[in-house]
Image (cartoon, helix red, strand yellow):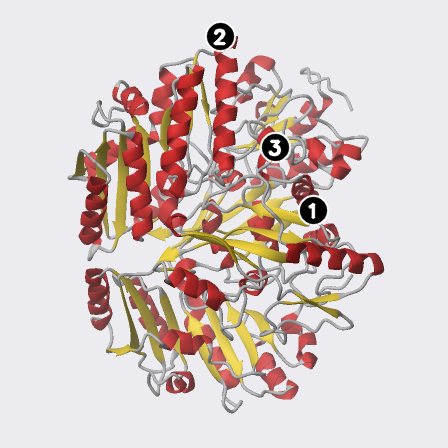
Amino acid sequence: MTTDTTPGDPLAAVLATIVGERGVIARPAELEVFATDALPTHRRRPGLAVLPRTREELIAVVRALAAAGRSFVPRGAGTGLSAGALADGDTVLIGLNRLTRIIAIDADDRFAVVEPGVVNAALTRAASAYGLHYAPDPSSQSACTIGGNVAENAGGPHCLKYGVTLNHIVELEVLLPDGTLVTLGSADGEREGYDLLGAFVGSEGCFGIATQVTVKLTPDPEAVRTLLADFSSLEDGARAVSAIIASGIVPAALEMIDGPTIRAVEASIYAAGYPADAAAVLLIELDGLAAGLDADVRAVERLCRDAGARGVRTARDTAERARLWQGRKKAYGAMGRVSSALVVQDAVIPRTKLPVVLRAIQEIGARHGITVCNVFHAGDGNLHPNVPFDGADPAARARVDAAMREIMDVCVAAGGTITGEHGVGLDKRDYMGLIFSAESLDAQCRLRDVFDPSRRANPGKVVPLHACREWAAAPGARA
Amino acid sequence: MGRGAGSARVIATAAATREVADRVRAAAARGERLRLTGGGSWLDAGRPVPGATALPLGALRGITEYVPGDVTLTALAATPLAEIERAAAAERQFLALDPYGAPAATIGAAVATASAGPLAHAFGTPRDLVLGLEAVTGEGTVIRAGGRVVKNVAGFDLTRLLTGAWGTLGVITEVSVRLRALPEMEESVAIAVRDDGTADCAALLTRIREAPAAPWSLELLSPALAATLGVASRTVLIARLAGNEEHVRAQLAALRALAPVARVADGVWRALRACEPAGAAVIRLAARPSRTGELWSAARAATAAVSGAFAHASPGRGTVRMILPGANAEKTTIVLDALSGLGARCIAERVPDACWSHPLLSTAVGDALSRRAREAFDPHWILNPGILGDEA
């Protein structure tokens, strides 16, 4: 197979007959926008990108690629943090963010049927007329797409109480890499048989493309309380998290933002009014029925103070609540402002291990001379150590890589996993062997082959190739 | 780096699991068909597995890891749900998984069959509760999927694939689940349903859904079942309210504003789970939740001629469950025939053998993807072959 991906790629003309000349991008300069996702440390420029406008065009594109035996990478808004939606060589990038139709909202059964390019926040806006919302809320929700959320099994702060993407997808129309359309799951109540829907959600574009997504919508809570608890040490904050989880109160969200992150946020346009001298704050949201909610608020406040909080305040109104959340959701952007490069991890650890692991992360950062900013879903034990650094300095990059590797080892040794919501992609592929045996990885390869026996969808991602017995042996196996 | 398991966190494989793997490997070598048996309390469920040797899994028993502060638990597959319930209750926690049937039911069987009970209304089914698992494939290979933490997207989701696969893609040997804290207060109530008319029932269900109440369980009971459970002698809706005291009181008041409400003993849920007599045929109907009233009427009409039949429904999930004590093939077929024009999904839990060929009960794993999954994980078709109506 040729690896020549100059504008002379003969496939470009074939695709142009489907999507029009303007829907095919072959010029290197124009392909630059697809060369990274939101993680700036990985770059791969595709040779060809195609942007279908309709479901029918998308189907025709995938069938043309199947006929030509070409591999492809589906991409939504490109807000991912695992380098999963990158393509290079002769792999074609399929941009899905023109497929933005909300096909139906069924307020009676609380479903919405959408195309994959619908933006997460746009769906919630559309559902708000019915007193409903789409619960999973990644920090990138103002840009990320439902199709991308399905591919990554995306999370978000409110997944602590409401569950991750998987728990909210009821039916999918999926275009398999060979061009076949299948329906997985069912919006018409429970169904028997293999949970192929569950297997597809989180498959990172390696099993095919969701062409139509039926999601559950969640009723807006009757009442919401947002609290900010302020701590003079990271461990005190972590102990408060453990105490809240152990108490049985399930907050809608329980987020931790540490001192370095607070200072980056407060220096940015997203300043949220976090106390600048705090070692950590917890952003805690409780929601549900109004009755009894304030009793839970008082209990959470007490648990925070018992763990050593200097102060706990409750947002007085919607505007203050929005401001507190804005600081959290834009923290990644605020950190990106102050440095040329940024890495972020996504390990999940058992929640009782938060104090000891956070201490270990601080120690690792100090030893390697790097700044670690922690802003994460503490209630789930889902860490996001962010490290801003000078991307132009190879020595800095080496220190960061070494520290990140050590942090991951600590999280895995604590009984954790390597990624809670960002996905494996390319970024964490080499960590898979830390948590899965060769046999387990091989089983994952087999599952991929169920959906994509030709191995053309998002090749080379998620599972390290050498882990797959048959793949390693296959003469056509590609890196 | 990361090649093989060299630097991996090694989780020990139980001796009993290694024995299961050896047994499956030997069976695979000679094409011997295996019928997986855990607690043995639900062996008449699913289609028959002819010509199979029993593969007893009872040695896979015990809780392997439970850190209450993490609110997660890991147990070997044949651990009875009752044992998990006891261990968790000692820490004021519980597993929100209460499938119908005998208390001897095991966690492995509940996950393998994706069985759920009244708590599914608020907490979902096994796919929503299981964090990870260990399994033995049809070739005798031990694999792990998912993990023990509450959020995990590492790798392709074999956990979801094996959950509800009835053992046909792998013998589940260990399961990790999320737990929840027991509530400060719990109160169960019966809400009178004016009659069995579809419109009345549907209207009440709509009002309850829109009321400021968030019950943990909500089940509609037929008059015969309500009487058996000592709740009423008419159609009623029972609700399980839980939370802090103020929260529960406010919900009670909200329900009272809609319809007459009577308190019932908390034990009603345990009694409901155990309501089906041994050997009864059990059939479920499923559709979108807004059709529950319609399904309920159809189920009541279809079972009217079967003496002793009763039913219950989960309006939040759009599921109606019919229990036909002592029904033979002829009577069960009459019920299935009566449900044929409904346009709802029909799922048989247990029916007389002759009924499995009824057109309403055609296999749900006959599609190309399901067949490829079977070929990938049980290439010799030895794990519970035929239980899902599939054939090699």
Q: Could you tell me which secondary element the residue under label 2 belongs to?
A: loop
Quadrant assignment, res B18: bottom right
The outermost residue toward the front is B15
Q: Mark 1 lies on which chain?
A: A
Image quarter where the C terminus of chain A lies is: top right
- Of tags 2 and 1, the one toward the viewer is 2
Check disc 3 and report the residue beneath it. Answer: B7
CA gap, disc 2 to disc 1? 43 Å
> Which residue is identified by label 1?
A450
What amino acid is found at the position of numbered circle 2 in the picture? Asp
**Relative to A295, B368 lies left or right:** right
Q: Do labels 2 and 3 share a chain?
A: no
| Residue A361 % position (x, y) | 41, 27
Mark 2 on the same chain as mark 1: yes
> Which chain does the numbered disc 2 sit on?
A
- Does any portion of residue B57 appear in the rendered image? yes
- At which x and y percent is residue B165? 62, 59
Dot 2 corresponds to which residue? A393
Against A27, residue B146 (above or below) is: below
Nearer to me, B203 or B373? B373
Q: In this view, does B43 lie above or below B327?
A: above
Residue type at tag 1 = Val
Question: How would you rate the neighbour count of disc 3 (Cα within 10 Å): few for under 14, some for 14-19, many for 20 or more?
Answer: some
